[in-house]
Amino acid sequence: MKKKVNMSTMIIDDIVRDGELTQDDALDALENAAESANEALPKARAKCNTDAEREKVQTDRNIVVLSYVKSEKKALQCTGPLFEKIAEDLRAEAGSVKQKANKLTDAVEAINLLSDLVRLAASLALAFG
Amino acid sequence: MKFTKSVVVVSILSKIQMSMLLLLIVFLSFSCSPVNIEAAKSLSATGRDTASQTQQNVLVSYKEYLRARDCEALQNGFMGTTDSNEYQEILKNYEEIQEELTKRSLVFERLADLYDAFGELAGLDAGGQTEKALGDLSGAINEYAKQIKQKPPISSDATAVISKIGGLVAREIQKAKIKEASIQTRTRVDALVQLLENPSVRKQLVRYRRFLFSNRKTAFEILWDEGVYDPKPIFDDFGEDAGLAVRKDVAERIKPDSKLGKALTEVIDKRLEMKSELIQRGYDDSIEALKQLVKEHEKLEQGAPLDLARLRTIAAELRSIAVLLSKAKTSVPISQ
């Protein structure tokens, strides 16, 4: 718990020092807040005496977590197309390599086919010769 | 009739001689590629394994997603907030994030497919098969000549030479294709490394997994506080060296606020902390494995001997990390 607070403080310090807030900084801070809320929950729950208090503690935690997961989802959706592009390139390349392997096999099969044809010609020659 | 047969034999003979000449020209023009076909076969198997281990260590598995949902349900069920909008929204967002990550897992599946195709290309015995096919063809032509009572157009010595050269040429063609495929594969793997090394991409994946882990830890702590777990296995670990087992009623003897209770909580905290560190390490090792793959492709293309042992070690470590992250014990040492 102590460690998390220090980490969040460090992120905020960096933002203050740099004077700018990047998307990554904001998401880091949100995730740290969500982690801290998770970590604080069991101890906070132990101190609750009524159901209403317990609901309040959990709802507060849920609000923090929801802010983080919503933002992270949007960030992931932004970088998703980069992965899709590489997946498509890899799919095309796998097809191309398979084609290379097939062409090699085709060459051998063509020679084998020619042998079969010559053998057929030989048997025909024998039959009509 | 006889005249026609002779023309056919002569025509086949001249075609064979022409083919031989062509084969020689092609063979000389390839001037022996340095690519080692056996090394390419090994690289394809290791590459496939690396793709699969990387997938497990970089992305959130379906099992992790289900556990995240379970933990959320447990926390909210326990605290009586299952009717809240926030709870429903959190579950909806987990689902949408998982859909997004599932699309990313395609990259690793495609990479594994590419290594399968690469293995298929390297696994062909193009040289041997061509040599045999050409030998069979010469045999068939000589047999034909015999049937039409002509002198065999190709001597056995010539057959052997034709087959040998044909086999060598086919092998060189295969090597050239392997080299070409290796260059293309390397380029794609390198692009994936760069994407995974992108600071934003890296943070998104590591951060989200770390958060899910903290969620699981919270659910565990709630259950631990409720006294549903038996700490016996942890104490058994301590007694293992001495060959001792913990007494059956150990759980009843430990009070949460006692010294032993606090010590036990510290052991559990450290074990869970180590799992959190493993998430970062799994990501870094995955990138290292992919970088190593790129290096081995370069060596293959240059004809240098491959060092797949390093790559296999990283893949084995990735496998251990994936196992450790999905199992309870985190005290199992991992090779450094």
Image (cartoon, coloured by chain):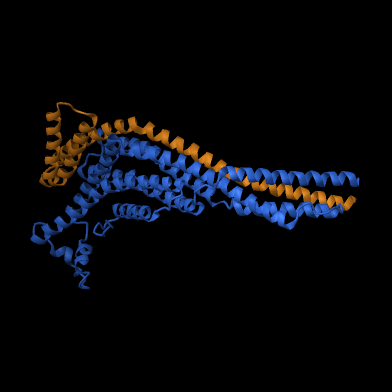
Taking the spot 21% from the left edge, 66% from the top edge, the residue there is B236
Q: Nearer the viewer, residue B7 or B58?
A: B7
Residue B152 is situated, as x and y percent measured from the top left of the image, at: 80, 54
Residue A56 is situated, as x and y percent measured from the top left of the image, at: 15, 37
Quarter the C terminus of chain B occupies: bottom left
State which chain is coloured orange. Answer: A
Q: Is residue B254 visible?
A: yes
Residue A73 is situated, as x and y percent measured from the top left of the image, at: 30, 33
Taking the spot 29% from the left edge, 44% from the top edge, the residue there is B68
Q: Is residue B257 above or below residue A82?
A: below
Q: Colour of chain B?
A: blue
Residue B268 is situated, as x and y percent measured from the top left of the image, at: 18, 55
Q: Nearer the viewer, residue B335 or A27?
A: B335
The quadrant where residue A4 appears: top left
Q: Residue furthest top?
A: A19
Q: Is residue A7 above or below residue B38?
A: above
Taking the spot 61% from the left edge, 48% from the top edge, the residue there is B169
Q: Is residue B143 left or right of residue A22?
A: right
